[in-house]
Image (cartoon, helix red, strand yellow):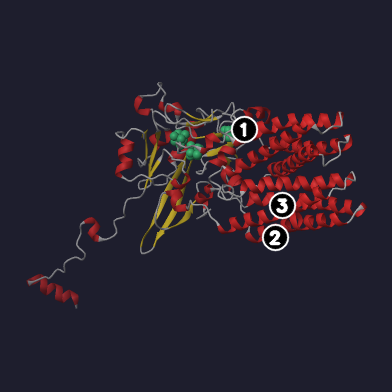
């Protein structure tokens, strides 16, 4: 059913730290690696070693430059994947029931056995989180690694999304954003986590942590404005005068 | 948005078909058209052919056309599903109207009711098509109050232009019908001009800053995530140069509206072969103009995903 659940028990999602992300693409690479053998496998990979490779990825890492007047410029590395929105327009537009949002955890999935490949859901997603599989003629998207997070064949500490586990900078966090006590909720509150394009009303579950204030002035690191001038006396004073000639 | 030919063809062809079908229903029920077998056959055949080829074309762009029937199941939430359901339902009263008109040569009584129901369902189907676009919040050029009125009026207009051809071919001299064609052309032209004006002036709320959750600063792309165009860029990154678009808009103004309007007006005052030629040229020109209009409808629609690929506003 493509009507949305009025509420979900959990709101599983990701918290992505734009302060620490170094833009290494490890999350995107490991996402592709896991998912090309996972729930939505295989993910198309056309012309992978050619001049114009093409294929389906559930996670893409952008890099932006932010010019901020007289403050120093920022480089923002921005991983973009499905935000598992509460008010997921991608689900309600689906005419077949292939797209759905799970009541138990809020994960948004595509049932590729029902999908007719009309692509309307990708038009309805503001964030570009859905990519069309030309080979199978169906839509694919991030599954929040549903085949990892509940996978009892994995060690408990490995029951996390592939992108989260692989991030070398610890910039991705996974958890229940419905539970105010969870680590991800606490982190979001402490760092003023943001919704993307809140004006569209999709109520994304994933949050983005904006970069922390940069340490620009000496006062930011507790150092004096200028170093004290050293005044040498005695023999050192004489040496200083001779050498300064 | 990428202007896919199958969708452009579908919306224009089925739009004209539903417009004509609705007018057949109304004019038939009102007794403005003769209850003659051949008039009924020609009109309904034209309308249903346009609708059916349009619907068929729309399934060509599906990844899995063999599953198309599934597209009717989610009518509770999806405008696309509602459109599918309404499109199929419309065939029922249209079939009854055809039975009365073509077999019994009667368009009164219950057959007239079938005509009215056909017109209402046709109109609802076109509204559903328009609502598919109207409901997409990431595309400001569609998610506004102009989309539905423009779609429905242009559908009625292109149906009326075809109706003019029909009445002239069958020598039905009715200035009410021809007058309606003139009125819908004028109204359609006015509405579409206002709609284009709205799209020129207005922008969507999201910006690159809100797309990234970064409040202050001028954001520009440093590096893209991939070295060649992906699905998102091919489907939603379509750009048309302003100069190019404006030229096409002038063509659409001329072929879609101005010329058919002038010729339809002329046809009210002349008769014989001259009038027939006028309405046929009006129809050909209008069809081309509306195809261009629909191409622009897609090509000028800016999806918010472009904010991640270099656009600062949409
Ligand atoms: S990010 Fe896009 S695909 Fe994911 S739930 Fe939200 S609207 Fe749907
Ligand atoms: S492409 Fe598939 S999942 Fe998306 S709206 Fe169409 S049928 Fe639903
Ligand atoms: S949660 Fe899984 S599927 Fe989603 S972006 Fe991360 S690795 Fe990819």
Of the two numbered discs 3 and 1 in the rendering, the one whose residue sits closer to the viewer: 1
Contact flag, marks 2 and 1 (Cβ < 8 Å)? no
Residue A239 got which mark? Answer: none
- Of residue B230 and residue B40, the one placed in the foreground of this image is B40
- What is the chain identity of the residue bearing mark 3? B
Residue of label 1: B81
Q: Say whether disc 3 or disc 1 marks the residue closer to the N-terminus.
A: 1
Q: Residue at x 66, y 31 (%)?
A: B85
Q: Quadrant of residue A115?
A: top right
**Of helix, strand and loop, which one carries label 3?**
helix
Up the image or down, A73 lies above or below A165; here it is below
- Of residue A44 and residue A172, the one placed in the foreground of this image is A172
Give the distance between the C-alpha atoms of the residues marked 2 and 1, in whole angstroms: 36 Å
Q: Residues within 10 Å of mark 1 (few under 14, many from 20)?
A: many
Of the two numbered discs 2 and 1 in the rendering, the one whose residue sits closer to the viewer: 1
Seen from this angle, which residue lies furthest front?
Answer: B109
Q: Say whether disc 2 or disc 1 marks the residue closer to the N-terminus.
A: 1
Residue B292 got which mark? Answer: 3
Residue of label 2: B247
Seen from this angle, which residue lies furthest top?
Answer: A153
Q: Which residue is drawn at 78% across and 33% down?
A: B112
- What is the chain identity of the residue bearing mark 2? B
């Amino acid at each position: 059913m493509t009507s949305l659940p009025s509420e979900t028990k959990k709101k599983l999602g990701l918290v992505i730290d734009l302060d620490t992300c170094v833009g290494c693409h490890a999350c995107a690479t490991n996402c592709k690696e896991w998912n090309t053998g996972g729930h939505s496998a295989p993910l198309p990979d056309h012309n992978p070693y050619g001049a114009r490779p093409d294929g389906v990825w559930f996670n893409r890492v952008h890099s932006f430059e932010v010019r901020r007047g007289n403050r120093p410029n920022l480089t923002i590395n921005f991983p973009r994947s499905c935000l598992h929105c509460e008010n997921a327009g991608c689900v309600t537009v689906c005419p077949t029931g292939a797209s759905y949002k799970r009541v138990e955890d809020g994960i948004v999935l595509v049932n590729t056995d029902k999908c007719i490949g009309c692509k309307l859901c990708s038009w309805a997603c503001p964030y570009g989180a859905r990519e069309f599989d030309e080979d199978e003629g169906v839509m694919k998207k991030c599954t929040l690694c549903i085949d990892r997070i509940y996978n009892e064949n994995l060690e408990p500490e490995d029951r996390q999304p592939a992108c989260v586990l692989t991030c070398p900078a610890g910039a991705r966090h996974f958890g229940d954003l419905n539970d105010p006590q969870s680590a991800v909720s606490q982190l979001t509150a402490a760092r003023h986590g943001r919704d993307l394009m809140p004006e569209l009303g999709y109520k994304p579950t994933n949050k983005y942590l904006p970069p922390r204030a940069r340490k620009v002035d000496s006062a930011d690191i507790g150092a004096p404005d200028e170093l004290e001038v050293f005044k040498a006396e005695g023999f050192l004073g004489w040496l200083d005068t001779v050498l300064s000639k | 948005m990428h202007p896919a030919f199958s969708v452009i063809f579908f919306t224009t062809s089925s739009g004209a078909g539903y417009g004509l079908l609705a007018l057949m229903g109304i004019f038939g029920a009102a007794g403005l058209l003769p209850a003659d077998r051949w008039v009924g056959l020609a009109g309904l055949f034209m309308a249903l052919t346009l609708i059916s080829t349009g619907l068929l074309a729309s399934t060509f762009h599906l990844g899995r056309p063999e599953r198309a029937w599934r597209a009717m199941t989610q009518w509770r939430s999806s405008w696309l599903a509602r459109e599918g359901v309404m499109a199929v339902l419309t065939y029922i009263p249209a079939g009854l109207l055809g039975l009365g008109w073509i077999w019994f040569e009667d368009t009164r009584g219950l057959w007239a009711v079938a005509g009215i129901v056909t017109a209402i369902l046709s109109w609802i189907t076109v509204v559903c098509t328009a609502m598919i676009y109207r409901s997409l919040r990431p595309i400001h050029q569609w998610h506004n109050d102009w989309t539905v009125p423009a779609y429905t009026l242009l559908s009625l207009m292109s149906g009326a232009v075809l109706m003019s051809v029909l009445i002239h071919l069958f020598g039905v001299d009715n200035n009410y019908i021809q007058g309606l064609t003139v009125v819908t052309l004028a109204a359609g032209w006015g509405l579409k001009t206002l709609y284009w004006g709205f799209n020129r002036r207005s922008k969507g709320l999201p910006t690159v800053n809100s797309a990234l959750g970064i409040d202050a600063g001028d954001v520009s792309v440093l590096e893209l995530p991939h070295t060649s165009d992906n699905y998102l860029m091919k489907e939603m990154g379509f750009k048309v140069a302003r100069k190019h678009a404006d030229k096409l808009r002038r063509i659409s103004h001329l072929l879609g509206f101005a010329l058919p309007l002038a010729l339809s007006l002329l046809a009210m005052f002349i008769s014989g072969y001259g009038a027939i030629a006028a309405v046929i040229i009006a129809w050909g020109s209008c069809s081309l103009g509306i195809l261009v209009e629909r191409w622009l409808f897609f090509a000028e629609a800016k999806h918010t995903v472009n904010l991640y690929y270099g656009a600062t506003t949409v």
